[in-house]
Image (cartoon, rainbow, N blue to C red):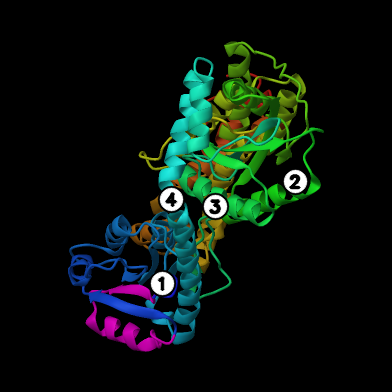
Amino acid sequence: MTPLERPIGVVLADDDVEMLDFLENLVDWNAMGFEILARGTDGLDALRRLRDRPADLLLSDITMPGMDGYALAAALRERNPDVQALFFTCHEDFDHARRAIHAGAEAYLVKYTLNGDTLSRELMKAAATVRQARTRRERENAFDESLVSARESLIYETVKVARTDPERMRERFALYKMGLRHAQFCLIAIYADGGTPLGAESDLARTDSSRPDSTHLTNGQPADAAAWRHELAARMGESFQTDGIADHLFFYGSQVILLHGWDDPPALEDRYVEILARNLKAQGDERAVRLVALRGVLCRSLVDIPAALADLAVRREAQFYNQNALLLQETVQSPNYAQPSPEAMEETLSRLLTPFRARGDFPRALEDVAASLCADRIAPSSVRRLFEGLIRRMRETDGSVPHDQPPVQLEGSSFAACLAAVQSVYARFKRAEVGALAYAERPDIRRALRYVEAHLREDLSLRTLAEKLHISAGYLSRLFRKHTGVSYSEYLIKRRVARATELLRDGDLSMEEVAERVGIENVNYFYRFYKRETGMTPGSARKGGAGK
């Protein structure tokens, strides 16, 4: 039995034995292509009962003694990184769903609504993901790893010593079956651009609110560099072999390099371009990344390879503002980028941070800055540093990003990818900001939010609000966080800052009146409060964020 034909191995974990029995008998596991490998009353118990075979799928309660569901999923992924997880719990609240997202869950199921149809649907979705991962692994294993490693070492050695010993390089190329049968050749670099940069939040994580019985979680994180490189090489190799194309593939840095030979005239045939475009699209769709193919200069000797690789690096930077995925034209002009001063870039950063912190029209500011950067042809390195710094400051303002979250790295990314990374972080920030209203499904929470909006200028302590709603302050505090995802005080601060910004921009009210309308009697305290929360003074906000 091949790995693709093997049943999908399942681990069940719940501290309720009756729930385990219920799950085991809820569907016909064997008929659906599954095999229960182990069941346990907590994470440690399940791991002890799991034998040598790694699991493919985990169905687990979240809260269990000893080892909870999140820790169990992490332990199983140490043996099989592609393990899928379906979490279920008695708690139907946003905090659990959010933690399930971060734990890489396929779905978040509520026990008291779980039935055979619901579980079958989720199992079929998880099975499709497992089989896709198995197919990918099979392709990677089928690829000759030793030959890939040898070719990768070869090209680095070529870069280093080709000019001093070209004959030795010819011998080694022949040894690794990389002979050149054409009078001239070029290098075509394929690299990843777009998707979710390292450390950036994915916009693809979402909640399917149309289904009351489960919450579907999707994460479109791109595969790591090694995975997409190996799979792309295997895919391209198959296509080239079918069409009788003798290109050689090797890895250089984070790129897949095609050594493409031809005789006169120097042109890329339509069939070759079609194969290249088809494979880029297929691979990009699967990986949620954009793959770019960039052609270099013509070469006539192996000793030209180091210069050809350097030329590719220049051409890649020259295409920083280009949106095309196939860049196969014969000539590319050398980039002529402007080198702005650090002070100018700091001022540009301020233009973006000011409306972001003041809850202003950040998308419009980003659009204006992006247009200005493109028009002025600002150097890619400066743009990347600008957006990396912006994202770092945005995440610091947000405050909900875990401390161990890595910084966003945009090295090698195009302008479009840099812009998309900023938009992804902003979208996450807005989801958190409006989360209170979005998740306020209970009538008493909706009443609380409406009261806050109508009485921002009054005493809005938690105790005061609780008395207005005729419930206890402690109960309201727990209820508010459970159904909005933020504490009451955090929400109140955000609303006061947003209202103050609106009033300041109107320009008709004095500072004392603005402060009084958002519930702050002391204007001096209002200045400190607004500066602390937005990073700028009320006067700057009134002037449209012209300064701090």
Residue topped by disc 2: 273
Per the image, label 3 sits on a secondary structure element best described as helix
Q: Is residue 229 positioned above or below 58 on the image?
A: above
Residue topped by disc 4: 488
Can residue 332 be seen from the camera position used here? yes
| Gap between marks 2 and 4 measured at Cα | 58 Å
Residue topped by disc 1: 2
Q: Position of residue 300 (x, y in %)?
A: 67, 25
| Gap between marks 3 and 1 measured at Cα | 19 Å
Span highlighted in magenta in the image = 6-31
Instruction: Tell me where residue 303 sits by quadrant.
Output: top right
Give the side of residue 325 with respect to residue 220, left or right.
right
Give the side of residue 63 with respect to residue 136, left or right.
left
Residue topped by disc 3: 234
Question: Looking at the figure, which quarter contains the C terminus?
Answer: top right
Can residue 454 be seen from the camera position used here? no
